[in-house]
Amino acid sequence: MGAVRFSEVRKSYGDHEVVHGLDLDIADGEFMVLVGPSGSGKTTALRMLAGLESITGGEIRIGDRVVNQVAPRERDIAMVFQDYALYPQMTVFDNLAFGLRRRKTPKGDIERRVREAAASLGLDPYLARKPGQLSGGQAQRVALGRALVRDPQVFLMDEPLSNLDAKLRTQTRGEIKRLQQDVRTTTVYVTHDQVEAMTMGDRIAVMNDGRLEQVGTPEELYERPANVFVGGFIGSPAMSFITAAAEAAPGGGTRLRAGEVDLVLPGVEGLPSEVAVGVRPECARIWDPSHPTMAGPVAGEVSFVEALGRETFVGVHVGEDRRVVVHHDGRSALLPGDRVEFGVLPGALRFFDAQSGQALAPASRVAA
Amino acid sequence: MTSRREQSFTYALLGVFSLIALLPIVGIVFTALQQKGGGASFGSFDGLHFDNFKRAWQDGNFGTYLKSSAIVAVSVVGISTVVSILAGYAFGMMRFRFAQPLFYIFLLGLMVPMEAMIVPLYYDLRDLELTDTYWALILPQAGTSIAFGTFWMRAFFRSVPPSLVEAARIDGASSWFTLWRVLLPLAKPAVLTMVVLLFMWTWNEFLLALVMVTDEGLRTAPLGLSFFVGRNQADLTLLAAGAVIVAFPVVVLYVFLQRHFIRGMVSGAVKG
Amino acid sequence: MATRPIIAEEVPAARVRGGDAPPGEPRRIGYVYLIPALLIFGAFTLVPLLHAVWLSFFQWDGITAGKWVGLGNYGDVFSDPVQRKAFGHALLLIVFYALLPTAIGLLLAGVVARTHVRGFTFFRVVLFLPQVVALVVVAVMWRMIYDPNDGPINEALRAVGLGGLAKSWLGDFGVALPAVGLIGTWVMYGLCMVLLTAGVQKIPRSLYDAARVDGAGPVREFVAVTLPALRGEIAVALTLCTIQALRNFDIIYNTTKGGPGDATSVPAYQVYQRAFETGQVGSAAAMGLTLAVVIFLLSTAINQIAERGSQR
């Protein structure tokens, strides 16, 4: 009913194509996050779905209906804008009622639906105020309310939390997610913040340069990134990459060499001769010879120390231009400039083709 | 921090030039208030005698002239404001094929002085038998006012965040509804500025009235004053009273809305 | 803000094809909104303009049939000493209407830039006042001021013993034009000051602080910081004032009527005389259009110079 489907959707401005053949299925009631850096085409895709941009090629369906030529008001969608776009000279009540009034909804219904939406967002005390008299957080909720009141098939959200301060952002994230779970309306949510994506999405679509890199649940994207881009984009601190020469090691496993790094990874087989190795911080630890599976040691120089109280991330320079972020529980006594040795957990490493960046799936008999 | 001496110098300089700006105006007001035939010259103050104004109004017909000016000014401003809002909206917010060249044509109209158009205007309107009517004063001034107004309102509409219009569109508002109910409340300061500027320019227009109007009953205030001067060379106080009457409405409007006048001239001029 | 402009010229031309519009976006209806404006503006501004071009090719007295003279009227603009003189006067008036007021405006803006002036709004309201008064009223005022017998200028001169300098300011061949020019200066310097001080507000304080730390005195600061930053505003002020100088009709008509003799003749007044007094309608049209072209050329020239300078 409220499912959305992008089929080979393309967008060009003149000769310049910004979205290349996007194929994406969003299930009815799903919270789908489109995430990517600026220029990735995520906002353009959302706007095409809204009907605010024309579609150069392909089809977009809402429900069973192809909506390419359908005006936004007929698409049964509601949108929350990054700058909220509240009608400045109208009261909050009128802002919420605007869309319903335009559709000639009976007055009693309007009254009821506005009050319900206001109640669920805690806006009752503000109904008589004008947008200029609201705080950022309150204005944001009015924007949400305006969409809620319409009870559409699809919610579209264009970076709605970007203008809030960090604390409010975290709080509102949870509220939006809860709200969506209550009403179970299909939601397409655009953000450039991968933390937001990971915490809010049922599924996430990672976009880059007008292309869909990967779509999947947060866990899928984190554990099985399809390529170097997704690997490096999802997760914070980001995955570190080292391009290495790989060869089978005598006695089993694979020998990786990259500059001064010379490691044997037991239990990892079947890699091509050149690989990009993806190292998440939590699979690189300070060298502990007694650890059963840790491979190493790798020696390097500390370039930064990020102490977060509960854990510490240590950036280690290995060779001229390679850096690996190493995880340390609790506090660390290390300082920039110190020499340090660390090891990696072979089962947790991710391998990618050094040329194409695509993920490889080597046989691995070792747990992380 | 700048020195005391510099501060005093600044205030002195501002004071001197303010005085120079003010003196002729104050002078004529004082002259208008003088006793008729009292032998006083320009600018001297000898008490408040308001009968000069009464004489100017009645014998001098300035009441009639003000009425004419008011009719013309209100009509021009009324028509031009509505039409300019519509045109500015189209140019500022809609994408259509010939928008660019059409807008340049309006810009052209903005730059062309009345002096270049007055001759054909006269003969055309004479052929249409519209000379010596209010239309001869209203329509040409509406034309030039619309050129300015369209440029001005377009600039305003371009400054509106597009997301506001998009939100209205998704909510189902037509372009007409969006213009009058969503955007115009935002436009009030811009519209007010445009109204005061157009009013001032229309009220003060002289050449057009001189050419188009011969019937004394239709004379606008500046034209009336010009003829009055010709007839009353000797009666200084009466002349002064007439002059004050003519300038009064715009000056009063200016004193209350000076922010709009000045802001309008400054930002309108940036394109000029 | 991740928002997009909906303005024709910011979008590549290929985008504005009919089929490229997002559904529901108002496009061709724009023409409908334009209809009233195009009708009125077209009929009462554009058509007369084109008609003026047509008229300028004829020798016509306004009553009988006209005679085709092609570009003859335009040739006269250059060859007829009367017309040349009128344009010459107009150019001279530019000094009084544009250069002098801009200089005064710069002086005032310069001092205001350095100090915080309390009650600046009051000064601004007063200084801008002459701009608001109808030019006919301005003419009446100044006729009284310049009056050779009772006017305050001559009375003041006599009072300080310089009675010999007292003259008929608007009636004397030598001084009539400058006298009229000074009226223009009085009218325009408030506008220049307002424009230039608005520009001065935009200059970041840090530039002045840096100059001051470098040991710059007031004059140096003005030349090094204020003047370059005001380039755009100076161009605007000069343009507006120049346009006023060239369009000068109201003041001339109500003070000297081009006299004494033709000492204060100006193109705008010539247009009026020729069209409505001496039956030279074609010539009037040509002069009017020439005036418009001169205005356009000067405006463009001023802005070009300003822009080139700022690209250093």
Image (cartoon, coloured by chain):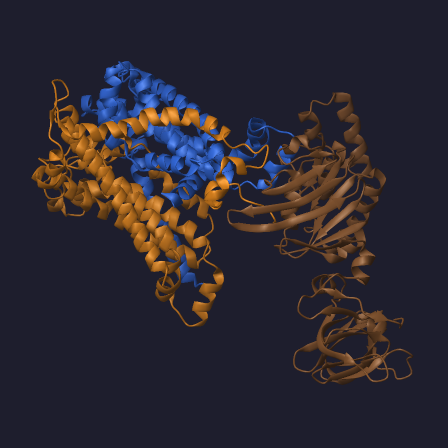
State the residue in front, C144 or A323.
A323
Q: Is residue C47 above or below residue C235?
A: above
Q: Quadrant of residue B212?
A: top left
Residue B239 appears anywhere in the view: yes
Give the quarter of the figure containing the C terminus of chain B. top left
The one nearer the camera, C80 or C206, is: C80
Q: Position of residue A195 (x, y in %)?
A: 76, 57
Q: Residue B239, relative to residue C221: is it above or below?
A: above
Nearer to me, A315 or A68: A68
**Chain C drawing hue:** orange
The location of residue A266, given as percent across then percent down, is 86, 79
Rendered hue of chain B is: blue
Q: Nearer the viewer, residue C263 or C58?
A: C58
What x and y, as percent, mark residue C301?
27, 50
Identify the residue at horizontal 85%, vertical 80% (top origin): A252
- Residue C297, image quadrant: top left
- Which percent across, then down, holds residue B221? 31, 23
Which residue is painted at 86% across and 76% down in the image? A267
